[in-house]
Amino acid sequence: MNIAVCDDIKLVRQGIVAECERIRESSGRDFNILEYDNIQNLKRDIGDIDILLLDIEIGEDSGIDVKDYIEENRLDTIIIFVTGYDSYVKESFGINVLGFIDKSEVGEKLSSYLTRAIEIKTGSNFTIEGLNIRNIKYVQSDGAYVRLISEDSREILHRESMNEMEEVLKEYDFCRAHRCYVINFRYVKKIITVGHGKRYVVIDDKRLKVSDKYVFKFIDRYKQYCIKELNNV
């Protein structure tokens, strides 16, 4: 596993690397630590990087652009922003972003974030049909099966009922929105209201209906999810 640190200030970068080395030694986990002081070299190797500890302002370049590049190219790199620029928090959100650490709090917070990222990358999180649930955008009913819609737009049939899937996924960031959909909050762009109070979840450019039966529970769970993500930032 490759963990990269990208910061253009050498002393800061070395401090983050030293903390990664301390975490590696104390945890007994095996991973490589790579250093980058510019985005050009980082992008050259990005396909080989599993976890990226990234500053937001790197010289005249932006770590937000790196985040966008990773998401546009559907790479599976997990990003942890390590920066002092809290004014960019809103822009730093994204599918691949696990969290946001202030540089002054690296010693206190990096271990928990890095441990969580490593667990995700090593597959210790739950999988269905070979898909890490983190990469399932939503589950759709399909007769006796359900259809798993993945982050890379694959559709995989899985023989379980929607009720069974709802039960399996309730401990994660999924929630039933309709008799036909169980949705991963991670991929929700927004919830919209149209017509006579009809609500829809927007994922990519697709609208998925939220039925009256599930609307209050879904919105409440989504608010809890958003609060949790803000606390992680």
Image (spheres, rainbow, N blue to C red):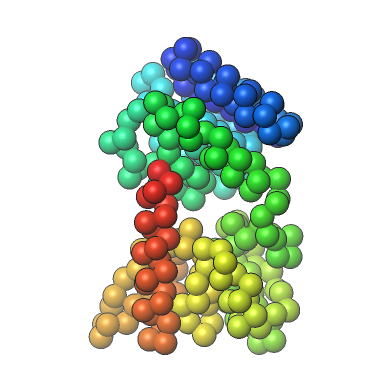
Q: Which residue is pictured at 31% across the width and 71% down the height?
A: 192
Q: Position of residue 68 (x, y in %)?
A: 45, 41
Closest to the observer, 188 or 126 = 126
Q: Which residue is pictured at 74% across the width and 65% down the height?
A: 129
Closest to the observer, 90 or 44 = 90
Q: Is residue 221 above or below residue 83?
A: below
Q: Position of residue 228 (x, y in %)?
A: 42, 55
Q: Position of residue 174 (x, y in %)?
A: 52, 67
Q: Is residue 152 above or below residue 200?
A: above
Q: Can you say which quadrant of the picture contains the N terminus?
A: top right
Closest to the observer, 200 or 226 = 226
Q: Is residue 22 above or below residue 68?
A: above
Q: Can you say which quadrant of the picture contains the C terminus?
A: top left
Residue 38 appears in the picture as rendered: no
Q: Which residue is pictured at 60% across the width and 57% down the height?
A: 135
Q: Position of residue 185 (x, y in %)?
A: 47, 63
Residue 76 appears in the picture as rendered: yes
Which residue is farthest left?
Answer: 196
Q: How many marks?
A: 0
Quarter of the rendering containing residue 160: bottom right
Q: Which residue is pictured at 39% across the width and 18% down the height?
A: 59
